[in-house]
Image (spheres, rainbow, N blue to C red):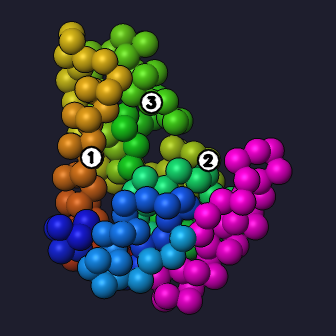
Amino acid sequence: MLAADLPVALVVADRPCRGSGLGSQAGIASVLHERSSFGDDFDRDRYASELIDILSDHQIDLVAMAGFGTVLGEPIFAAMPGRIINTHPALLPSFPGWHAVRDALEFGVKVTGCTIHVATPEVDHGPILAQEAVTIREDDDEASLHERIKAVERRLYVDTLRSIAERGQLLGTPI
């Protein structure tokens, strides 16, 4: 996103990561909002509410998730309806969930791809904004296929976000 000169106002990470460092190097505010737990006691709604406060403090009106692994709770979707964009390494609605690449290989499909979609409380079920197919090669394993999908995903995500920024709206709603 930074290399494509997209307007990035804030980097928020749920764990220490390369993205935070890249944001800081570019002079962009970065916040580490680390998860307190990875067990059953993790409070998604509380975490989402805290994230809303962070986004509000920085006057963020559109969120582009990239590598953010935490499934968010309902409060953030109520606070930012239709304003959270995500990517997925499959052609949704096929293969939702965390293991999409592995699932596609195990199912034996010949084509998979990536999807850019609006994030909603139901994981990987929001309105689709863009998709692009990636042919599965006979010698693909999970790692090689995922790398080829990520290459397409990075370009498609930037193109989709740029289009949203140029239009100044998402799904008919001004941003």
The amino acid sitting under disc 1 is Glu
Question: What is the number of the mark on residue 153?
Answer: 1
Assign the C terminus to one quadrant of the image. Answer: bottom left
Task: Please provide percent x and percent y for residue 157.
Answer: 27, 56
Picture quadrant where residue 104 is located: top left
Answer yes or no: do the residues labelled 1 and 3 have beta carbons within 8 Å?
Answer: no
Answer yes or no: do the residues labelled 1 and 2 have beta carbons within 8 Å?
Answer: no
Task: Please provide percent x and percent y for residue 42.
Answer: 77, 53
The amino acid sitting under disc 2 is Glu
Mark 1 vs mark 2, foreground winner is 1
The CA span between labels 1 and 3 is 14 Å
* Circle nearer the N terminus (2, 3): 3
The residue at which mark 2 appears reads as 122
SS label for mark 2: loop
Give the magenta range.
33-60
Assign the N terminus to one quadrant of the image. Answer: bottom left
The residue at which mark 3 appears reads as 100
Measured along the vertical axis of the image, is residue 96 above or below residue 152? above
The amino acid sitting under disc 3 is Ala
